[in-house]
Amino acid sequence: MSFKNKTSIVCCVLFLLFSGGAVWASANIKQADRKLGDFTAKVDSHLKAIAVNSASSDIASLSLKPIVDSAGPMVTRLIGGLATRGVDVELFLNTADGLPQFLEEQGIALSFLAKDGKRATVQIRSAADLSRLSENESIREIRYLPPTILRVGAVTSRAPKAMRSDLAASALGVDGSGQTIGIISDSFAQTSIVRDGNTVPAQFDAGILQGSRQQDSGDLPALISILRDDVPEGTDEGAAMGELIHDAAPGAAMIFHAAGRSRAEMADAIDQLCANGRADIVVDDILFLNESAYQDDVPALAASNCVSKGIPYLTAAGNDRDQAYRYVYRDLVANIDEPGLSRFPSGNDLHNWSNSGEDAFLELRIPANSTVYAVLIWNQPNSSINSANGAQIDLDLYATRAESVAALNPSSRHFYARSSDEQGTTGNPRGDASEVVILTSGASPETFYLAVEHFDGSQGDIPQQSGVPLEFRLLLTGDELVSVEYDYNGPSVWGHSTARGVASVAAVPWWESPEYRPEAYDTIEIDPEPFSSRGGDITIQFDSNGQYAPQTRSAPHFAAIDGNNNTVLGSSVVPSEAGEPDNFLNFYGTSAAAPNAAAVFALFKEAYAGVSPEQLIASVTNTAIDVKGFRASEGKDDVTGSGLINAEAAASYLASLIGADPIPLATPASTQATPSSRNGGGGACFIATAAYGSYLAPDVKILREFRDKVLLPYKWGQAFVAVYYRYSPPIADRIASSDALRLATRISLSPLVYGLKYPFVSMLLLASGLLVLVRRRDAHKVKLQKVAA
């Protein structure tokens, strides 16, 4: 090394030492930044970047701008979700005194406050929130909380795969974060199955639930807000619902409110959850027996009000099978109308159940050790909904153990029960148009006889509208009946399941999903749960004021998955499929299906900020997989509505509906679904599905794989598929409606299908064909040359 070079190096080292000493003697740049003011003294770099780069930032200190890096993809994403989903931050506190009140005054949500008062977690929705937090002297430091790396708990539901919400979540890059799902059920944390010695708050208390068994195992979020859980004898079905939600949307927060004991309490629970700043989605599994079937009752009105605020509301359609009747009232003795002067029926004003004779009694048989609730509801308004406009016709419901008018007398040994509340008469409205009797059996099955007595009021048209006859619905809920005398003929869905804007959810067991083996059970088609309630088009005859104003509602809207693993409640009965039976309980019922659907809605709301409840329902109903098995039928039906939810197809439809970019598929997509009203059911390969008649057809599967593996990995392929999704559905509809077009389309697709199915053979045939063409061309050239010569 030359002396010159040595001298240069020494000089450089001396310069660095002295200059470094100068830097060491004063604050470094981060320390200097902190001296710029209170805001910079408390907020970390991520939050500074959010504050400075946010378009709505009102941070006064412009001197921050030079010291903060450009937003970058991470901060850009955070800013994008700031107002819609919020950003979680951690507060390090000097003291917690007065903090909850301060946060409430600022409109900043408090998620967690440590017992020692040293830390808190809040959610900010604007740069202004950061500014106000930084001005509070109790707060020492504010840090951005990055997403948690989630580890699945001890129990995993099969619903995400069965509904394809796992594919949708992967494609959209979401997990429900930023969404809070409100749950209404009987209870959440009352039993020893959920609680242990470390669980807080105390049993029946409201607060932030922590340390439950399911939270410790990772099957529920670490923090759950409990607004009310003080209704005794709960089964903690709310926690079971929460487990299913957490499996499909692990990033979603939860908030719980007990349904209470009455319709009014239920409405209050809905109002509490739908209040500003609480739930983004609400789901329940509750029905009150005295909810009206002919008028929006108070829970229905509360749920519809929730939807009007932009909050999706989902409810279980019910587990009442086909156990319901709907009749126009027909008097057993038409020429006699007694004015309700007798304390028990004479037999002259009983409903005639028979269409071909006279029968005043409906015979039914219930199993041993069972309970069945018989609910009579007729087309009159309820005074509990509007006190000035109650029922103007009075009906009563009787249950006996003998098919005899004498048994209707309470003094008879064959008399069992009656419900005979007072309702009004024409021009004198009073009471609610409902009656309930409870049938129970002992160690042996029992037979009962039901009779409907017209006590007073009009027997013909209802007073509110000429030409509209008196009709009633008899609903049999609880245990499944052994037998009934007459075939069921009415919808078993009622109450707020038919409320305006509410999504009513039916149930399909997970093993019946196309992702498993539907052809192996019951029928070769997808079969709904045998207990899922039958609905259809249902007329709500009265408005909330009790005025005749008929509206037709349809329920259920679609089906979701049940039979999922959980740790709280359920049955060990399950088919031997996909690792079952295992050691976990299986949660059956529309009570399980509804929270699974709510979790899918959470994924969509995170992905597409501002999406409306109507758009969410439309995306699911227009892409559902047609359920055509036992009790269901092709197209939209009374048991599953539009069919089984297909979250992946619904996400694609929703993107198109709101004008968003087509979803990028992180993994090869499975079967997509067309609107279930179309012949042939599912398949985002719309035309192929219409042509082959089933999304399960082997040739359709080949075409889907071609789409996923050849087209979608490339931008040009994604663009082609997006155009196809947009324009092919009406073409598929036309093809599906014509056998000739379906045959022609299959023939047209055959070369492509066989080329994909047998690529080596296809290449040989193509090469052979090209060789033949080349030889023919050469032979033709030789022939022309000879002619020219």
Image (cartoon, rainbow, N blue to C red):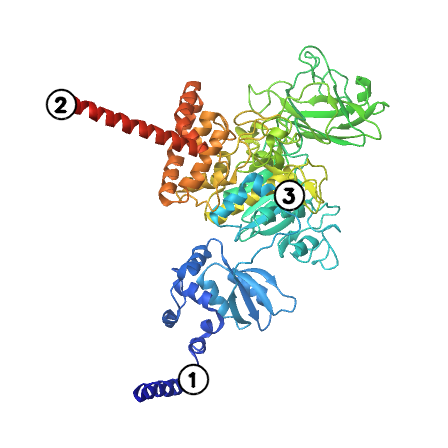
Residue under label 1: 26
Question: Which residue is rendered at x = 76% and y = 16% of the image?
Answer: 347
The kind of secondary structure element at disc 3 is helix
Gap between marks 1 and 2 measured at Cα: 98 Å
Q: Is residue 514 visible?
A: yes
Question: Which residue is rendered at x = 52% and y = 40% of the image?
Answer: 647
Q: Is residue 309 visible?
A: no
Instruction: Of the two numbered discs 3 and 1 on the same chain, state the one appearing first in sequence.
Output: 1
Q: Position of residue 349 (x, y in %)?
A: 71, 17
Residue under label 2: 788
User: In front: mark 3 or mark 1?
Assistant: 1
Q: Tell me the amino acid under the disc marked 1.
A: Ser
Q: Position of residue 69 (x, y in %)?
A: 39, 67
Instruction: Of the two numbered discs 2 and 3 on the same chain, state the one appearing first in sequence.
Output: 3
Gap between marks 3 and 1 measured at Cα: 64 Å
Q: Which of these two is toward me, 466 or 472? A: 472
Residue 761 occupies which quadrant of the picture? Answer: top left
Q: Position of residue 328 (x, y in %)?
A: 63, 19
Q: Is residue 256 left or right of residue 195?
A: left
User: In front: mark 1 or mark 2?
Assistant: 2
Badge 1, how many Cα within 10 Å: few under 14, some, many 20+?
few
Badge 3, how many Cα within 10 Å: few under 14, some, many 20+?
many
The kind of secondary structure element at disc 2 is helix
Instruction: Of the two numbered discs 1 and 2 on the same chain, state the one appearing first in sequence.
Output: 1
Residue under label 3: 266
Quarter the N terminus occupies: bottom left
Judge whether 92 appears above or below 607 on screen.
Answer: below
Q: Tell me the amino acid under the disc marked 3.
A: Met
Gap between marks 2 and 3 measured at Cα: 97 Å
Q: Position of residue 572 (x, y in %)?
A: 72, 40
